[in-house]
Image (tube, helix red, strand yellow):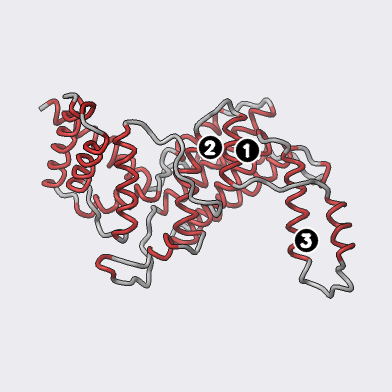
């Protein structure tokens, strides 16, 4: 009986509990107002100094945008596509702000990126006799800088290195930013397959592989995370911001995990719950008995895949092709008995 009770607690703590927290709002109105009020006090870069701005002032500017994105994300919570894209923007803005604090020469990169972006926008706006190459070069020289901001992955790696290899930047990148990029921001195979349902039926309304309130938690957490870093750099207390970030980012679930979890809640009656508890007991016994360690890697993959399909299964949230990729990834990580240290790159598009 004790084993089954422990297994039931494991099911709640590892599967059901996080999904509940990630799919529901968090009652933090008083704390959110306090955090936003104290966050505004950290933004002291007005009037803006242009090219004379310091890295911490650039981070403050990113924090000002984070506050706006937090508000817009909450307003868009009923609109699935919009709220996901806003959450991704909030996470990218947080990366930029943290990179300004912990990255390698962010001022030069930011100016160089601005100069190149302005050239791209101006080059086709006027007659070539007016906006000449000499004019564009003069604008670039006036802005200054060289290169451009790195992509999100390189920013996350740089932030992690600047924080003594802290894991959270890369965790957020792989767990949240990459899936949001592939499923929502980019027109690619993954986003298109959201319109393919069970048995190949085409869907006008795409399957939604996330939870809307997880998007809100992401935007809230990004405000707290960036505010905590700026407060620390400025020598101010940052416990309020750090606590706020933790509460929300722990509720920001990986999109594909929510796909599985939402399906489980739709179909997880008493019989299914008891079967899942028994499955966890069996899985623990498989590991505790030494059989898992004795089995070959391929045997462990086969056992875990069979267990996963019996007790989790595809609940028709997404197409079989995407589900198979997800299961393969989860099973492979579990079979190695450790998280993957270097996930396969999704490409520079993320």
Does the CB distance between marks 1 and 3 fall below 8 Å?
A: no
Quadrant of the image occupied by residue 61 = top right
| Residue in view at x 32 percent, y 40 percent | 332
Could you tell which of marks 2 and 1 lies nearer the N-terminus? Answer: 1
Tags 3 and 2 in contact by the CB under 8 Å rule?
Answer: no
Q: Which residue is mark 3?
A: 119
Q: Is residue 90 left or right of residue 293?
A: right
User: In the picture, which quadrant includes the N terminus?
Assistant: top left
Residue 175 — which label? none
Where's residue 193, x and y in %? 38, 64
Name the element at disc 3: helix
Q: Earlier in the sequence, mark 1 or mark 3?
A: 1
Label 2 Cα crowd, 10 Å radius (few <14 / some 14-19 / many 20+)? many
User: Residue 91 in the image: x percent, y percent?
Assistant: 55, 46
Whether residues under marks 2 and 1 lie with C-beta atoms below 8 angstroms apart, the answer is yes
Q: Residue at x 23, y 26 (%)?
A: 293
Residues under labels 3 and 2: Cα distance?
31 Å
Q: Looking at the picture, how far across and down is residue 307, in whole percent?
A: 19, 42
Question: Mark 1 or mark 3, which is nearer to you?
Answer: 3
Residue at 61% x, 51% y is 68
- For label 3, the crowd category at 10 Å Cα-Cα, with few meaning under 14, some 14 to 19 and many 20 or more, is some
Is residue 59 or residue 136 the one in the foreground? 136
Of the numbered discs in the image, which one, if any, rests on residue 169?
A: 2
Judging from the image, what secondary structure is the residue with disc 2 in?
A: helix
Disc 1 to disc 3, C-alpha distance:
26 Å
Give the distance between the C-alpha atoms of the residues marked 2 and 1, in whole angstroms: 9 Å
- Observer-side mark, 3 or 2, equals 3
Is 340 left or right of 106, judged from the image as shown? left
Could you say where residue 229 lies in the image, as x and y percent from the top left?
61, 32
Q: Mark 2 or mark 3, which is nearer the start of the sequence? A: 3
Residue with the mark numbered 1: 98
């Amino acid at each position: 009986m004790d084993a089954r009770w422990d297994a039931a607690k494991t099911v709640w703590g590892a599967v059901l509990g996080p999904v509940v927290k990630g799919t529901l709002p968090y009652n933090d109105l008083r704390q959110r107002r306090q955090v936003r009020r104290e966050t505004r006090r950290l933004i002291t870069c007005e009037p803006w100094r242009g090219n004379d701005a310091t890295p911490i002032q650039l981070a403050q500017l990113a924090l000002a945008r984070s506050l706006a994105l937090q508000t817009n994300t909450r307003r868009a919570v009923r609109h699935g596509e919009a709220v996901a894209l806003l959450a991704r923007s909030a996470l990218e803005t947080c990366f930029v702000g943290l990179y300004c604090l912990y990255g390698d020469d962010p001022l030069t990169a930011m100016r160089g990126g601005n100069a190149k972006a302005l050239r791209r926008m101006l080059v086709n706006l006027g007659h070539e006799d007016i906006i000449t190459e000499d004019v564009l070069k003069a604008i670039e020289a006036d802005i200054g800088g060289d290169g451009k901001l790195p992509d999100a992955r390189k920013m996350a790696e740089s932030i992690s290195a600047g924080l003594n290899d802290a894991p959270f930047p890369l965790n957020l990148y792989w767990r949240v930013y990459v899936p949001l990029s592939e499923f929502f921001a980019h027109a690619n195979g993954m986003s298109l397959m959201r319109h393919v349902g069970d048995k190949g039926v085409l869907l006008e309304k795409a399957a939604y592989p996330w939870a809307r309130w997880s998007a809100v938690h992401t935007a809230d957490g990004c405000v707290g995370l960036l505010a905590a870093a700026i407060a620390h750099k400025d020598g101010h207390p940052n416990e309020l911001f750090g606590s706020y970030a933790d509460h929300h980012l722990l509720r920001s679930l990986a999109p594909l995990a929510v796909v599985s979890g939402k399906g489980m809640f739709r179909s997880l009656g008493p019989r299914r719950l008891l079967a899942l508890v028994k499955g966890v007991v069996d899985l623990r016994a498989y590991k505790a008995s030494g059989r898992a360690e004795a089995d070959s890697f391929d045997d462990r993959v086969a056992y875990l895949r069979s267990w996963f399909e019996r007790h989790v299964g595809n609940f028709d949230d997404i197409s079989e092709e995407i589900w198979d990729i997800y299961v393969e990834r989860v099973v492979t990580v579990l079979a190695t008995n450790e998280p993957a240290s270097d996930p396969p790159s999704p490409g520079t598009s993320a």
